[in-house]
Image: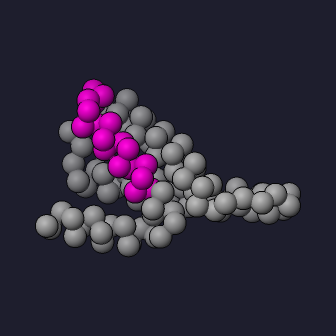
Amino acid sequence: MITYQVFLMGLLVSSTVTGLVTEAIKNILGECGKSYKGNLLAGIVALFVSGGLAVGYTVLIGIAWTKQVVVIAVALVLCSWLCSMLGYDKVVQAISQFKQN
């Protein structure tokens, strides 16, 4: 079972790694003189980092891939993308407000 706390821990890890990897890629592209779209780049990195984290977690814990796990994995990818664009604190605050309501 994936709890709220596990989801937030995964979000913290994935958003941190997504932000760091995105910044590293931006620096590499900037040095090469290539143009890029920052939010699109963050989305692609979030897809791979969060997707890999979700798959790795489910394999290590032995959770079956159900519809609920897929929805949580997609939510993790989207929230990680938002975190890399807006910041972790803003996204967690929004999630907490949804949970309270």
Is 84 within the magenta? no
Give the quarter of the figure containing the N terminus. top left
Image-based side of 13 in relation to 31, left or right: left
Q: Is residue 101 above or below residue 54?
A: below
**Which residue is pictured at 26% across the width and 33% down the height?**
67
Is 79 within the magenta? yes
Q: Which residues are magenta?
A: 63-80
Image-based side of 50 in relation to 76, left or right: right
Q: Position of residue 53 (x, y in %)?
A: 44, 42
**Which residue is pictured at 32% across the width and 36% down the height?**
70
Res. 68 in view: yes
* Most distant residue in the left direction: 101
Say which of 16 and 34 sits in front: 34
Q: Position of residue 34 (x, y in %)?
A: 81, 57
Figure quadrant of residue 48: top right
Give the quarter of the figure containing the C terminus. bottom left
Q: Position of residue 40 (x, y in %)?
A: 60, 55
Image-based side of 28 in relation to 9, left or right: right
